[in-house]
Amino acid sequence: MEEKLIQRLESAVQRLESLSCGFRSSASSGNGAVDDDAPVDPAISAYQDLIDQFFGRVSSAAEKIGGKVLEVTKVLEEAFSVQKKLLINAKQCQKPDHVGLAEFLKPLNEVIMKANTLTEGKRSDFFNHLKAAADSLTALAWIAYSGKDCGMSLPIAHVEESWQMAEFYSNKILVEYKSKDPNHLEWAKALKELYLPGLRDYVKSYHPLGPVWNPTGRMTVSAPTSAPSKAPTSRGPAPPPPPAASLLIAEPSKASSSQPNQGMAAVFQDISSGAVTTGLRKVTDDMKSKNRADRAGIVGSSEKEVRTSSPSVSKTGPAKFELQMEYTYEVDLVCDLLLMITWVVENQIGRKDLVIDNCDAKQSVYVFGCKDSVLQIQGKVNNITIDKCSKMGIVFTDVVAACEVVNCTGVEVQCQGSAPTISVDNTSGCQLYLSKDSLETSITTAKSSEINVLVPSASPDGDLVEHALPQQYVHVYKDGQFITSPVSHSGA
């Protein structure tokens, strides 16, 4: 009886070993290459269904519009295709370290940088379309989530938060083309549905905790340590060539602390000391503004990052005054893959000596949560955004794109040079000071009150002339349409 039982067990073990070998041979061919005849993974099939179902509407509307909109839509399609390949490769590879993850995400980073390049330079008629598409691609960075300590939100929350950045420009499209061209409305609505609910529901169903890696798969390709002409190993195809100034070039940090970060936090720490910042000088303690009495509050362009102390800290987060190489959209969240340079001034209270000098036309300035402070921007910048500030004064020279005031109370903005557009949204109390070079500035207001514009007088020695922008309007239906005019008050 016992001999028969042993024979049956040995027979069962042999069958299991044969099945295991057959599975390995069908799952891979050519030393790690994907077999085209292998069954399609349900998660990959669902991702292709996502593209077929939602992206078709975006592409169809873009073809009717043409021009730059069609061009950025093709880049959008390329980004989703690249992420599909990354998901396939992730199921063939082991979970990499932060260096390997940076190399793994390099193809996606190239496409996102390509979309961001389309928004630079001279502002086109479809600028809102380009910004909506480029900003929406940050949602694809959910694939970089590697754990709760990586510095990112969970993939589902990351997709929703990323769309909030793009929705600002998407809503502008809906307002601008509401009664003009329905193709633009269709494009904006289809773009939103691609992410919400499209990508969000896909991530929720298949990758709520990040991409699925193969514990028994091959190792991911790490950053090369020798000459790039060295022949690759036979276990997989050669990795794509890295971009010239990629944000995801991961080199070991020579100035890392004794307690290094883990996950994505370590990735961005290595990025900040990589090839994109090789031309900057190392900032020693005696060079920092907080340790120099002669330059308190002044940030030089040659400094990589400067943090100044604040007499008080807002409840929303710590005070910031720094030049960031990453594109940030929350106080303490850095998980975007776009290569953008932004001066971030956050939660400064009672500071009258904040200065940013020697700016670059490709840099942006983001001011958030400041109160009772004054900021001077000496030089030309690409864009200025003032968000949730109170009793704040901004003095700038030139701006390439626009100066935006959002959700503020009692702010003063002075333009000493030129600015194509000044936008005031959901703001109570705003004083705009224009120079002679900025009299042709286009001023847009929405849900705002107490907006006054001061312009130079006709005489050289005259005082500034103040003009109040109307906030009440009368709508009269006449000849088949509504005629809108500002309310005028008269009387003794």
Image (cartoon, grey):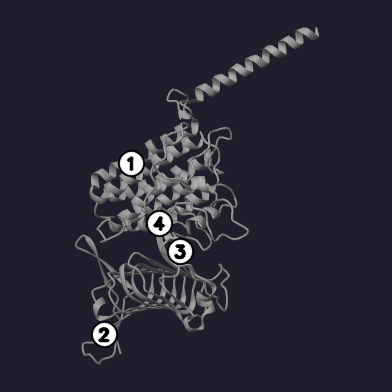
Q: Which of marks 1 and 2 is nearer the N terminus?
A: 1
Task: Residue at 67% x, 14% y: name it.
Answer: 12
Secondary structure beneath dot 4 equals strand
Secondary structure beneath dot 3 equals strand
Q: Which of marks 2 and 3 is nearer the N terminus?
A: 3
Give me the C-alpha separation between circle 4 and circle 3.
10 Å
| Residue topped by disc 1 | 57
Give residue 137's position: percent from left, percent from top: 40, 50
Secondary structure beneath dot 1 equals helix
| Residue topped by disc 2 | 456
- Note whether residue 133 is visible: no
Mark 1: amino acid: Arg
Task: Residue at 25% x, 43% y: name it.
Answer: 63
Q: Mark 2 vs mark 4: give the one in front.
A: 4
| Residue topped by disc 4 | 339
| Residue topped by disc 3 | 324
Q: Which of marks 1 and 4 is nearer the N terminus?
A: 1
Q: Which of 25 and 413 lies nearest the eye of the viewer? A: 25
Vertical position of residue 30 compared to residue 182: above or below: above
Q: Which of 60 and 121 lies nearest the eye of the viewer? A: 121
Mark 4: amino acid: Leu
Location of residue 366 (image quadrant): bottom left
